[in-house]
Amino acid sequence: MEIKVRALDGIEEKSVQQVEEELLKKHEEELNNGVIDEVKIDTSHLEPQVPEVQEEEELSEEKVLSYIGKRYNKQINSFDELMDQRQSNEQLPEDVAAYLQFKKDTGRGFDDFIKLIETTALWILINFLENILQVHKMVLMMKTLMFSWRSTPTMRIWMKSQELRK
C-alpha cells in the first residue's frame, strides 16, 4: 500500500468563512470610500408615456335609457317603467320559484332540493296509503257489524215483518 504525501508549505489555504469575511470587509471599505461603480442605464430608447386622461362624463337619465333601448331593442321612457317591466317579467313557474325559495332559505343546491321533493312525495304517498287502509278497515268493521246485527234474532224478526208488509 502506498501513501502519497504532498508538502503545502508555500500555499496558504483559507476557509470559506475567512473568504466571506474578507469580501465583506472589502465591500464595506468601498462603501465608505464611495468607490462604487456607477451603473448607467440607457433610457434614450424609452419614450415617455403619458396616460390619456378621459374626463368622466356625467350620465344622464336620457343617455342611460337610450343605451338600454338600443341594447335590448325596447322603448323605455323612464326608470319607473323599466322597474315595472322587470317586476312583471319576474313571474316564474311554480317549480322554479319553489327551488329559488329553497336555495334562498337554505343555501343548498339542486340535488338537495330534489331529495327533499322525493322525501316529501314519499311521505305524502305513505300518508295517503295509511288513510286508504284506515277507510278500508272502517268498511270491513261496518260490514262485520252489519252482518252480526242481521244475525241477531230480533233483527231476523224485524226483517221478516218488513218482507210481509210488501
Image (cartoon, rainbow, N blue to C red):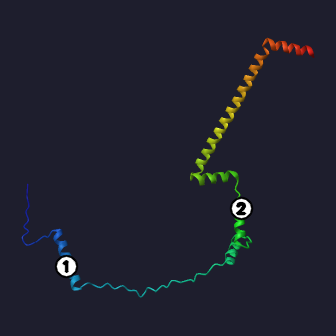
- Residue at 69% from the left image edge and 29% from the top image edge: 134
- What SS does tag 2 mark? helix
Looking at the image, residue 33 sits to the left or right of residue 39; the answer is left
User: For this rendering, which residue is in front, 163 or 97?
Assistant: 163
Q: Tell which circle, 2 or 1, labels the residue nearer the N-terminal end.
A: 1
User: For this rendering, which residue is in front, 80 or 20?
Assistant: 80
User: For this rendering, which residue is in front, 92 or 6?
Assistant: 92
Q: Quadrant of the C terminus?
A: top right
**Where does the image place residue 124, in percent across and percent down from the top left?**
66, 39
Q: Residues within 10 Å of mark 2 (few under 14, many from 20)?
A: few
Are the two marked residues, 2 and 1, in contact with CB atoms closer than 8 angstroms? no
Looking at the image, residue 113 sits to the left or right of residue 43; the answer is right
**Where does the image place residue 25, in percent across and percent down from the top left?**
18, 77
**Where does the image place residue 88, in percent across and percent down from the top left?**
72, 62
Looking at the image, residue 76 sits to the left or right of residue 32; the answer is right
Quarter of the rendering containing residue 14: bottom left
Q: Is residue 31 above or below residue 76?
A: below
Q: Residues within 10 Å of mark 1 (few under 14, many from 20)?
A: few
- Residue at 18% from the left image edge and 72% from the top image edge: 19
- Residue at 81% from the left image edge and 15% from the top image edge: 155
Q: Nearer the viewer, mark 2 or mark 1?
A: 2
Amino acid type, label 1: Lys
Q: Is residue 29 above or below residue 93?
A: below
User: For this rendering, which residue is in front, 92 or 155?
Assistant: 155
- What SS does tag 1 mark? helix
- Residue at 61% from the left image edge and 45% from the top image edge: 116
Residue tagged 1: 26
Amino acid type, label 2: Asn
**Where does the image place residue 66, in percent across and percent down from the top left?**
70, 76
Residue farthest toward the right in the current orientation of the protein: 166
Residue tagged 2: 89
Q: Is residue 9 above or below residue 129?
A: below
